[in-house]
Image (tube, rainbow, N blue to C red):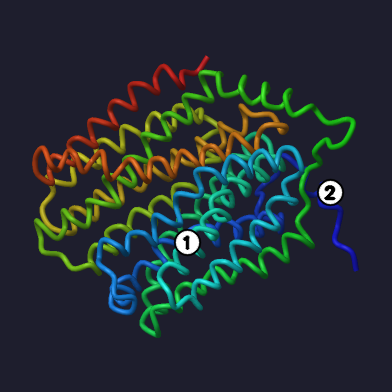
Amino acid sequence: MAPPDSESVSDRSAASSGDSPLADLDLWLLFAVTLVGVGNVSGVSPAFPQMVEVFGISRAQIGWVVTAYSLPGLLSAPLAGIGADRLGRKRVLVPTLFVFGLAGGACALARSFPVLLGLRAVQGFAAAPLVGLAVTIIGDRYDGTTRATAVGYNATALNVGTAAYPAVGGLLAAIAWYVPFALPLVALPVGTAVAWTLEAPAVETGADAESFGGYLRRVGERLRDRRVFGLLAVNFGIFILIFGAFLTYVPELLAARFEATSVAAGIVLAAASVSSALVATQVGRLTTWISPARLIQGSLVIDGVALALMPLVPGVWGVGMASLFYGVAQGLNQPALQTRLTELSSEASRGIILSLNGTILRLGQAVGPLLLGGALLLGTIDTVFYAAAGLAALCGGASLWLLRVE
């Protein structure tokens, strides 16, 4: 039995409207791609204390397990986006899933720290494009409100994974430090299913294809578009807030002010994923009467208020409520932003534009903790959250021009 034409789309998948895209089984397969592509930091981090002892390394050195995984994505995400636009979505997605799964699974067999870091770098190189490619294909398959709904559900899948991976990784780490590193092996059956069943839109190849120089000019034009550049710039600010303030310093705030345990910190962080997942399912409905740009702008207001409240509220429960509020913002801005990027990019450039959004994520992941850490050096833990709230206000003000509705 031969796999279906990897570059054709059936009438079923080409439908751009309907009661719900959830009837499309291929969409569930794209959810699976998103799920395997997230959590490969939070899923293995519960094993870090054991790894310090097993490998005889310092607590500072364990951070290289994250860095080795994250840095290659700065290069691989745009390269994969170009490949997806020029060669076809599946021709990039399928081998990427297999490399990700095999390199990730091999990490579970590593008994040398340098070998582990090398495998993590290969895994991270393959991991970076996965979510962007999934959203690219969703953008290809749907239009209008249905597209926004499908992107919102994909964001829900991402948030479910974000909330679940730390708990799953903790349970597996209780068996042995290396067991959580085997989680990426799930990508192998997912990659097989994608190869045999997923139907992806066609791209022009051969004599009919646009020249590579013409393609680069088209991408350059898109990036010079104030709306596209503005979305990427605003999202950079959002990712600085997520990785620099929320994920890095909420646990510190809880420990310093309330002597909360790591379990309590995990629950507080998971609360944001829960509210984000729930809100993301409603983005398609919201876009029928509120533009994606307005949803993004409104989410930045929520971001700022939630971050400003965190050092003011009494008790762990208060920070948890602020975390729920913060999650609402992410449930609005990520699906709305991804939907708007798919609208503003043609099928010929959608892969690279959405992959660059993944690069922006990793830049925010790298810059955020350093930037907000500087605020901590200048003041107290409260200063971090007030500075983050100020940054949210700055991003919100910039978005009024960059994302203005014309």
Residue 187: image location, x then y, percent: 61, 66
Q: Please, is residue 134 above or below residue 216 in the view?
A: below
Disc 2 marks which amino acid? Ser
Q: Does 205 sit left or right of 322 as displayed?
A: right
Nearer to us in this view, 259 or 359 = 359
**Which numbered marker is on residue 161?**
1
Residue at 61% x, 68% y is 102
Within 10 Å of the Cα at label 2, are there few (<14), some (14-19), or many (20+) other Cα atoms?
A: few
In which quadrant is the N terminus drawn?
bottom right
Q: Please, is residue 282 above or below residue 36 in the view?
A: above
Q: Is residue 232 visible?
A: yes
- Asked if marks 2 and 1 touch (Cβ < 8 Å), the reply is no
Q: Quadrant of residue 384?
A: top left
Q: Please, is residue 94 above or below residue 13 in the view?
A: below
Q: Which residue is mark 2?
A: 10
Q: Is residue 17 visible?
A: no
Disc 1 marks which amino acid? Gly
